[in-house]
Amino acid sequence: MTLYNELNLRGVLRNEDSFYSSRVKILVLKRLKLRRLKALRLIVIFFAESFLDLLNKVDANIKKFLIFLVYNKLVSQEMVQMNIGLTILNQITMMFVMMGFGYFIYYYKFMDDLGTQQVSNILLKICGPCTIITAFNFAFNLSKVKKLGLTIILSTIVILIGLGVARLLYGKDHRLEQFAIAFSNAGFIGIPLVTGLLGIEYVFYLTGFLICFNLFVWTVGVYLISGQRSLITPKMMVFNPALIGTAIGLIVFISPLKPMAPVADAIAKIGSMNTPLAMIVLGTFIAKSNLIEVFTSKAAYVVSFFRLIVVPLIILFALKLVPNVYQDIKMVILIAASAPVGVMVAMFAQQYEGDYEYGARIVSLSTILCLFTIPGMLILSNFIW
């Protein structure tokens, strides 16, 4: 009996068409030439059987390993999506609770229109700059500076995209709507989202976006709300609260000497008042208007659609051109660009005698809707990038 028949009889080559069986056939036919001593044949048969069994076990283990990897990938993606959703839900719930306090504060006459305007000034000119200074208060790092520079460049492009979309949509009219589409709530929504999803250290890069945001908002934004070019002066561009805070923050960042702990803590505490005061002020604005109109205004839905979907989608595809080595920066910018309408649209409208009640309605509606749109944008970025 030939060795080939012996192998077949022993069931080693169970699958005539398999890769492994054909390799063993060639090996046996060429090297043993079918006629050898019985002992040698038995040794070859033993090792052939062991080899094929090992291959079968390895195949099974590889399959299990691949299934394990795919399962873990799917589970991790679901966990990330749940984390994004929960972070946004918690943040927005907290914001609306604070807005509720603002609503009742104004409704029960604990604060009048003058008080609201004064709190808005404190918020814009004191709390905002303190937030920026706090974000720069850590040890100097050259690689972070380079990434911050890239963030500023990309953020400038992103804000210009928003302004361009708003201008194409409305032309020279509807300036408040243009402001709402172009300028997101990058600070109030962006900071907690970036902290929750990426980590507190990435707020430093978000500061790059806020630098550009504040530069544009205190120039182009003021013009859009007020309609007065005379307000856009070199003094306004250089000495607005945001740039003053940025300049102080850069000095703190570069300097080897940092503020003493009591001073740094005091600045941080004042900066932490940013979101609560903004939401309280926004709640007072809503108290002055009809709450039902928040959900029945067609114009507010149109603005929210462009602010939450159209502009972020354009930016999402534009950021695909940036190498994935800067994935963290891309994600920070996308979060900032996907945020709802900025609270400053209502604050500026009040300061420059615009329709701040309408502005408050747009902010409220877009803030509710972003609960669904921001997770969608972040999940979509995983497929597109």
Image (cartoon, rainbow, N blue to C red):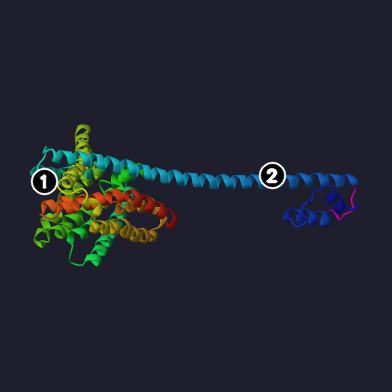
Instruction: Find residue 57 and name its label.
Output: 2
193 to the left or right of 49: left
Residue closest to the eye, 23 or 366: 366
At numbered mark 2, what does the secondary structure look like: helix, strand or loop?
Answer: helix
Marks 2 and 1, how far apart in space?
74 Å
Residues in magenta, as a range: 32-37
Q: Can residue 226 be spotted in the picture?
A: yes
Q: Overall secondary structure of the magenta stretch?
A: loop
Q: Position of residue 143 (x, y in %)?
A: 34, 49
153 to the left or right of 245: right
Sequence-wise, the earlier of marks 2 and 1 is 2
Q: Quadrant of residue 303?
A: bottom left
Q: Position of residue 254 (x, y in %)?
A: 25, 45
314 in relation to 49, above or below: below
Q: Quadrant of residue 231?
A: bottom left
Residue depth check, mark 2 versus mark 1: number of the one nearer the observer? 1
- In the rendered structure, which amino acid carries the disc numbered 2? Lys
Q: Residue at x 14, y 60 (%)?
A: 223
Residue annotated with mark 1: 117
Q: How many marks?
A: 2
Contact, CB < 8 Å: mark 2 with mark 1? no
Q: Residue at x 22, y 40 (%)?
A: 100
- In the rendered structure, which amino acid carries the disc numbered 1? Gln
Q: Position of residue 96 (x, y in %)?
A: 25, 42
Q: Quadrant of the C terminus?
A: bottom left
